[in-house]
Amino acid sequence: MPKSQEEIVRIFFNYLSKSNYDEAKEFMERQRLVFLNNAWPKAMFDILCDFALAEKNYYDTNFEPSKNKMLERKEDENYLDFVYKTLYQDLEKLQTEVDDNYVIKFMTTLLQFISVRLQLLELYDKLYEIGSSNSWINFSELSETVKNIQNDLNNFSPVDQVLRIVRYELDCIQCLFKCHEHLGEWSYFDSLISLKESSDAFILWEKCYQNKESWRFGSLFMSKSILPPLLLWFKRFKHMTISKFMLYFYGILVRQSSLREVKNTSETKNLHFFTKMQQLKQKAEALSAMLVFESPEYATDDDSSNGSQSIIKMDPYIKYKIIISYPKVPVKFDVVEKMKINEGEHSVNKIEIITDENITYMIMRVDLKIIFILCFNGKPKNEEREKASTLEFVSMLRCHKYFTSVNR
């Protein structure tokens, strides 16, 4: 029995909202054989079949070209970006050839949805590039980018069911970016709130895949999972964020519970950053490994300079605060103050070596306000090796490893 246009659209997006992409494509192929009427052009069925396949590849994080390419593409283009742009162009062209008001409205809705997808693909491409560059990450800027995408995410009936999943995706990554932004400010309460909000969004997103068949087309994960690879990537990123949170606020967490409880939680949940820092210190045979927060100097009005502002120099022992130290050792923060502060790209991964009274400080910035320091009694035994280990540890704290894995 032929179905109405509204019924076909409802069933198609119902399949997509349940992650049944192959079923959605097969359903639309069957409807193409029935051929509704002149109000629904046959090319529309082709577009929707390709759209279902694109959505499948999106959640499989299959952003790069594969052997079974749907369309020819330029070598420097993101595969899915090219597919969605082609679908957008074909849909725009087809829209000028139809007269049915419902079909025109549906096409407009689908165009809006595809534009949101393109913005998300651009975001993931940006994360991959940031991870590859091994530079400081502006989480405030990334958070603002996600917020702008969220503002474009209106209720697009009849695709509201699919949009619900997209909202959870955006909420999750927005809160994780916010958490890293607050971690860079060493703000316990704000970091905790953002971490809780990201967990809440992730739980809602995860529920969308409960009682589903195992995810069949993700080659990245050998064991079967009901979760798509994109959501599993978010799960790893969230886990890394929790580990970083525990490292930055280790002292607070110990005071709120106990040292034994924090250690047990870190071991059982594989929250490894504190252990990594311990291992780095031991392998380097250093006196101590520590993270330090640098309070920003502030400007004040200078009456003697015609209303201009001057920078108030802070006492180094007030300006620098130890986030965590393993083990605790006296630190000469006036020595740390000698570190050359240069925010240029060439100095992002620069490691300063400063020696004072037979104590050598190996110093590297994690970001603008967080500094990692290895203290040595005398010179490091293998300076180049310790520099490489320091760079690797700092890179993990900057999330580079996780950002490069989003685009497999």
Image (tube, rainbow, N blue to C red):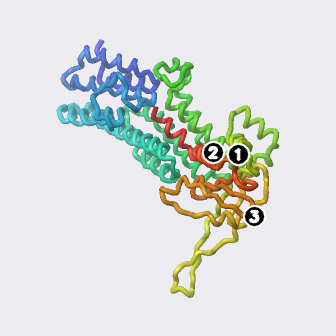
Of 400 and 95, which appears nearest the observer?
A: 400
Confirm whether residue 105 shows in the render: no
Q: Residue at x 34, y 28 (%)?
A: 51
- Location of the N terminus (image quadrant): top left
Residue 379 percent coordinates (x, y): 70, 54
Residue 388 in the image: above or below residue 359: above
| Rendered image quadrant of residue 396 | top right
Other-residue count near label 2 (Cα within 10 Å), few / some / many at <14 / 14–19 / ≥20: few
The answer to the question of whether label 2 and label 1 lie on touching residues, with beta carbons closer than 8 A, is yes
Residue 42 percent coordinates (x, y): 22, 22
Q: Residue at x 62, y 51 (%)?
A: 183
As helix, strand or loop, the secondary structure at mark 2 comes to helix
Residue ID for mark 3 = 357
Residue ID for mark 1 = 284
Of 390 and 100, which appears nearest the observer?
A: 390
Could you tell me the amino acid type at mark 3? Glu
As helix, strand or loop, the secondary structure at mark 3 comes to loop
Residue 368 percent coordinates (x, y): 57, 58
Q: Residue at x 51, y 86 (%)?
A: 306
The answer to whether 260 appears left or right of 171 in the picture is right
Other-residue count near label 1 (Cα within 10 Å), few / some / many at <14 / 14–19 / ≥20: many
The answer to whether 374 appears left or right of 150 in the picture is right
Residue ID for mark 2 = 385
Could you tell me the amino acid type at mark 2? Arg
Q: Mark 3 or mark 2: which comes first in sequence?
A: 3
